[in-house]
Amino acid sequence: MFRRVFFSFHYDNDCRRAAQVRNSNVIQRNLIDAPGFIDAASWEDVKKQGSDAIERWIRRQMEETSVTVVLIGSQTVEHNGKVRPWVKFEIDESLKEGKGLLGVYIHNCNDPVDGRDSKGKNPFDNLYFGGTNTLLSAKYATYDWINDNGRENLGTWIDKAAQDAGR
């Protein structure tokens, strides 16, 4: 089934790894539509406009998507244990909208400039369902792009996340 997907990731550290996922065969076969992939210059322009502009841009990119895929790199969760602010915002918006949600570790993707990276912490282990003591990791699955053969399985993972969310 065709799905519209939003990819959430720490841009500065993982843009090239995220591009590998976005350009995978699953997306090239038109099983997934991933709007709003932004290049460095465009991202810098949006950032210069401030937080409100970034939030508006994110919300526009998320419109009509049914699933958010959080691409997890070494710095998605900062050293102080907090999820990067824009990744957290995207997760929060996904939860508010009832979108499917899943995580995919991308540290093993070979960045053409930086090579492979160390495995980062699962952001779902650091976030709770609103007003509860239940971690998001209790409900939302994570996979490894390389070890779990993401190129072949991403569509299945996305379908499952969408179905789990009733979409």
Image: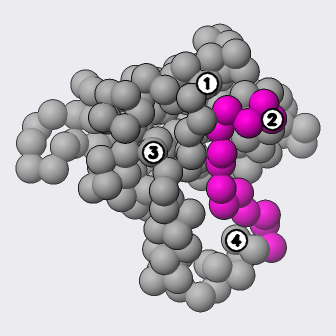
Determine which of the numbered discs, if any, sits on residue 28 in the image: 2
- The percent position of residue 37, horizontal first and vertical second, equals 71, 57
Q: Which of these two is toward me, 82 or 58?
A: 58
The residue singled out by tag 1 in the image is 154
* Residue hosting label 3: 66
Asked whether residue 49 is in view, the answer is yes
Mark toward the start of the polypeptide (1 vs 4)? 4
Q: CA–CA distance between discs 2 and 4? A: 24 Å
Q: Residue at x 78, y 66 (%)?
A: 40
Contact flag, marks 1 and 3 (Cβ < 8 Å): no
Select label 1 or label 3 by which is in front.
Answer: 3
| Dominant secondary structure, magenta | loop
Q: Looking at the image, which residue is at 56% across and 39% down? A: 3
Residue 135 left/right relative to 35: left
Crowd class of label 3 (few under 14; some 14 to 19; many from 20; radius 10 Å):
many
Q: Quadrant of the N terminus?
A: top right
* Mark positioned earlier in the residue sequence (4 or 3): 4
Q: Position of residue 124 (x, y in %)?
A: 35, 36
How would you rate the neighbour count of disc 1 (Cα within 10 Å): few for under 14, some for 14-19, many for 20 or more?
many
Please give the residue where the numbered disc 4 appears in the rendered image: 43
- Viewer-nearest of discs 2 and 4: 2
Residue 34 located within the stretch drawn in magenta: yes
Q: Position of residue 67 (x, y in %)?
A: 46, 42
How far apart are labels 2 and 3 at the CA level? 19 Å
Q: Are marks 2 and 3 in contact (CB under 8 Å)?
A: no
Name the secondary structure under disc 1: helix
Distance from the alpha carbon under mark 1 to that under mark 3 = 14 Å
Pair 1/2: label in front: 2
Which residue range is magenta in the image?
28-41
| Direction from residue 148 to residue 166 in the image, left or right | left
Q: Give the residue at x 41% y 33%.
A: 162
Whole-number angstrom distance, CA of label 1 to CA of label 4: 26 Å
